[in-house]
Image (cartoon, helix red, strand yellow):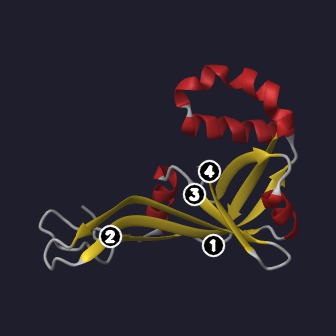
Amino acid sequence: MSADWALEVFDKAPYITVSMSGADGIPYGLPLSLVRTDEKTFWFHCATEGRKLDILRVNPRVFLSAVTRCRPLRGPKDGSFTLEFQSATAVGMAEIVEDESTKKEALRAICRRFLPNQMEGFEEAVTKSLHRAAVVRITLTEPPVGKRKQYDANGDEMKYGRME
């Protein structure tokens, strides 16, 4: 599937797994609530201390993965046990944001995505908690990749980017 399609999967996913690896080579990944603000930029927030920030300071390379529309089923025509899904992956570089105004704008974008009907409380909340929040910007270093398995109304698998 196209890079644009993969970005849509990221936008629809309730969380995106961010995987990284520290200096010791031990992999570490966790699902986070990310927001995308353009074709290459994702943001998340977290506490100002912790393992993920320690790892990102040493090795900022990250791998993003997301899955939506995931459901097990029996293949409509052959009866096989299978899974319909839409997925996206991407590689990027993470940067811990220090600039306060950039942090606020990122937090505003995160709030708009996950609590759009609560924006009237944003300014007060960010004023109270900005000092306790770290913000991380992830910039994609290559186009994202999307994959899916999906059946049409006739039970035929939609292959080769076929859309309906």
Q: Secondary structure at mark 4?
A: loop
Q: Secondary structure at mark 3?
A: strand
At label 4, which amino acid type do we have?
Leu
Label located before the other in sequence (2 or 1): 2
Discs 4/2, front? 2
The residue under label 1 is 142
Question: Which residue lies at the image location 76% right of the left edge and 36% below the top edge?
Answer: 104
Question: Which residue lies at the image location 86% right of the left edge and 50% below the top edge?
Answer: 49
At label 2, which amino acid type do we have?
Leu
Residue 83 is labelled as: 2
Q: Are marks 2 and 1 in contact (CB under 8 Å)?
A: no
Discs 1/3, front? 3
Q: Are marks 3 and 4 in contact (CB under 8 Å)?
A: yes
Q: Residues within 10 Å of mark 3 (few under 14, many from 20)?
A: many
Discs 4/1, front? 4
Question: Which residue lies at the image location 73% right of the left edge and 46% below the top edge?
Answer: 45
Distance (Cα) linking label 3 and label 4 = 6 Å
Label located before the other in sequence (4 or 1): 4
Q: Nearer the viewer, residue 162 or 46?
A: 46
The residue under label 3 is 16
The residue under label 4 is 34
Label located before the other in sequence (3 or 4): 3
Question: Which residue lies at the image location 55% right of the left edge and 52% below the top edge?
Answer: 15
